[in-house]
């Protein structure tokens, strides 16, 4: 397979240009494409969801491994995919913004159409970088069906996800990912593997969903983490207060800190996930007993 040659041919044939506004950087390195496909263990009883198939370069490799459900927002790309893959027996393409669809509902619709239930459902994608976090949060928070996510992200995002407490990269992404999953960096990818070449190095990460904190109140945890880091240079109490955390007064928030043995000087990046969970549980239990 010569993906570079095919990509140039498709771009010429359809006179398409990579659109910055849709985060389009097409993967043209066959070693990387093969490695990504090799990271997922699937067969024809499973489903791979690809977000943003673009010209279909990764789709080509995934199509040999599984049923495919594709979400693409760019009409030009939809036309390319429709024509590139004549055999659509294991491929369904949905022309829509992935952030606007109910993914689990679409999986169920496809299962009905095929009269079969998929064994495993995974997401594999070279993500549009401008919406990496919203996509990851959506997949983790909303889907009850997807169990693994293998995606290309900016290397810097991969580092933020795996950052240690007190590190400058430690933040919302680190904590939200740790809450829902276990994440590993699998491959580092040079800008030369894409056209057009992005300005940054990329990385493929594997996110395996885990139910570590099943009994923890997700809504409180999410609000706590987002508002603690909303003004990360300030003391955490002030950041929570300034951002109306659960509409509590500063006095209430101070009391929570005292009861959880936390100094008033604490900053958001100093607390491990265990402390965020402890705070969440304390707030949840106090609210329930009121
Ligand atoms: N998968 C292709 C590849 O690896 O060469 C293209 C990857 S490119 C980085 C990102 C793709 O996501 C583009 O095709 C873009 O049009 C699509 N995209 C951008 N925003 C999207 C959205 N909100 N919903 C669905 N697809 C989107």
Image (spheres, grey):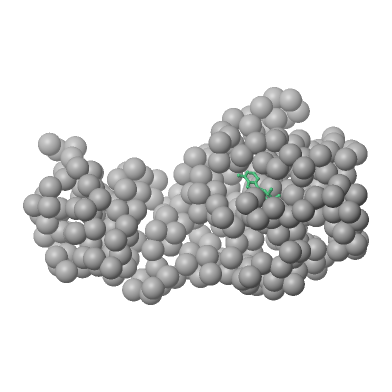
Instruction: Using the rendered image of the protein, determine whether residue 275 is visible from the camera's viewpoint.
Output: yes
Screen quadrant of the C terminus: top left
Q: Is residue 115 above or below residue 220?
A: above
Nearest the eye: 190 or 104: 190
Tell me the residue at 75%/69% (across/down).
193
Looking at the image, residue 270 sits to the left or right of residue 121; the answer is left
Instruction: Using the rendered image of the protein, determine whether residue 186 is visible from the camera's viewpoint.
Output: no
Looking at the image, residue 123 sits to the left or right of residue 247; the answer is right
Looking at the image, residue 266 sits to the left or right of residue 186; the answer is left
Tell me the residue at 59%/44% (across/down).
146
Q: Is residue 208 above or below residue 202?
A: above
Quadrant in the rendering for residue 263: bottom left
Tell me the residue at 19%/37% (across/down).
288
Tell me the residue at 56%/41% (across/down).
99
Q: Is residue 70 above or below residue 235?
A: above
Task: Give percent across and percent down for residue 9.
Answer: 91, 56
Looking at the image, residue 153 sits to the left or right of residue 234; the answer is right
Task: Give percent across and percent down for residue 207.
Answer: 56, 57
Task: Give percent across and percent down for residue 154.
Answer: 59, 65
């Amino acid at each position: 397979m010569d993906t570079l040659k095919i990509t140039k041919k498709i771009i010429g044939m359809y006179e398409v240009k990579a659109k910055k506004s849709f985060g389009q950087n097409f993967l043209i390195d066959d070693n990387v494409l093969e490695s990504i496909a090799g990271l997922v263990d699937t067969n024809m009883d499973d489903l791979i969801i690809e977000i943003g198939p673009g010209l279909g370069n990764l789709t080509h490799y995934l199509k040999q491994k599984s049923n495919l459900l594709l979400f693409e927002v760019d009409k030009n790309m939809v036309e390319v995919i429709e024509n590139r893959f004549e055999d659509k027996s294991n491929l369904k393409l949905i022309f829509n913004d992935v952030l606007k669809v109910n993914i689990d509902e679409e999986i169920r619709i496809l299962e009905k159409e095929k009269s079969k239930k998929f064994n495993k459902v995974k997401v594999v994608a070279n993500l549009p970088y401008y919406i990496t976090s919203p996509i990851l949060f959506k997949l983790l928070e909303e889907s009850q069906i997807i169990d693994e996510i293998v995606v290309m992200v900016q290397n810097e995002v991969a580092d933020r996800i795996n950052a240690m407490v007190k590190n400058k990269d430690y933040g919302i992404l680190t904590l939200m990912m740790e809450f829902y999953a276990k994440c590993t960096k699998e491959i580092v990818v040079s800008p030369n593997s894409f056209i057009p070449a992005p300005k940054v190095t990329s990385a493929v990460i594997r996110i395996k969903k885990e139910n570590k904190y099943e009994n923890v109140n997700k809504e409180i945890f999410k609000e706590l983490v987002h508002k603690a880091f909303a003004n990360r240079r300030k003391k955490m109490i002030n950041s929570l207060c300034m951002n109306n955390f659960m509409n509590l007064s500063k006095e209430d928030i101070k009391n929570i800190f005292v009861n959880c043995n936390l100094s008033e000087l604490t900053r958001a990046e100093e607390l491990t996930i265990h402390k965020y969970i402890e705070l969440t549980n304390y707030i949840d239990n106090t609210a329930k007993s009121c």
